[in-house]
Image (cartoon, rainbow, N blue to C red):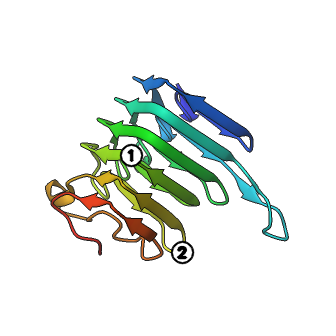
Amino acid sequence: QTNNGGGIYNNYGWLTIGDSVIAGNRALKAGGGIYNSGGEYEDNAQHDGWLYLVNTSIVGNIVTEENSVGGGLYNESGAVATLVNVTVAGNTADYSRGGIQNAGRVNLYNTIVAENEASYGADVYTQSGKTTRAQNSIIGDESRNSNYTAYKNGTNSTNVGGTSFIGTSRG
C-alpha cells in the first residue's frame, strides 16, 4: 500500500484521463484514487501537475491512516485539476476531505461530488487562499457532517454558476 495516490500518482506531469473508472484503490495518507502533485515556477506563470479528467468516475477509494485526506482526489498546492462530466462519490478519508481535498486549483464542470465520507469536509474541501470553480455541478449534502459544510475554508471559491449545493450552505 502506497502513502499517496493509491490508484494514480501524477508527479508534476500533464495527465489526461477519459472514459474511465478509478475505483477501489487505497492509500495511507492522501489521494486514495488520485494524487495530483504540482508546483509553480518562480514567476508563477507556469504550473506543473495538470490533471484533466473527462467522462470519468472516481468511486469507492479510501485513505486509511489517521489524519488522512482526499479519499477520491488530493490536489496539491500549485497543481491544477479540471473535471468535466465526472462523478466523485463513495470515497472515504479517515480525517477529512472524503471526495476532493484541494490545496491548489480545481475546476468542476458538469460534475457531481456527493456521498463521500470524512470527519471534516466530506465532499469538497478547499484550503484557504486556494480556488475551486464549479459550473453546472452538484456538490453533496454536508448536513450529515457536523463539523464542516461544503467550502467552509474555501472562501476563495469563485465562479459558482449553475451549481447546486444540496442541503448545505457555503461558509
Label 1's element?
loop
With respect to residue 77, does 11 lie above or below? above
Q: CA distance from mark 1 to mark 2?
A: 22 Å
- The answer to whether residue 33 shows anywhere in this view is no
Q: Position of residue 48 (x, y in %)?
A: 75, 51
Instruction: Tell me if 155 is positioned left or right of 42 in this view.
Output: left
For marks 1 and 2 on the same chain, the one whose residue lies earlier in the sequence: 1
Label 1 sits on residue: 111
Instruction: Tell me if 74 is positioned left or right of 87 in this view.
Output: right
Between 99 and 29, the one lying in front of the other is 99
Label 2's element?
loop
Q: Residue furthest right?
A: 42
Label 2 sits on residue: 129
Q: Position of residue 71 (x, y in %)?
A: 41, 41
Q: Position of residue 124 (x, y in %)?
A: 37, 55
- The answer to whether residue 35 shows anywhere in this view is yes
Q: Residue at x 35, y 51 (%)?
A: 95
Comparing marks 1 and 2, which lies closer to the viewer?
A: 1
Amino acid type, callout 2? Gly
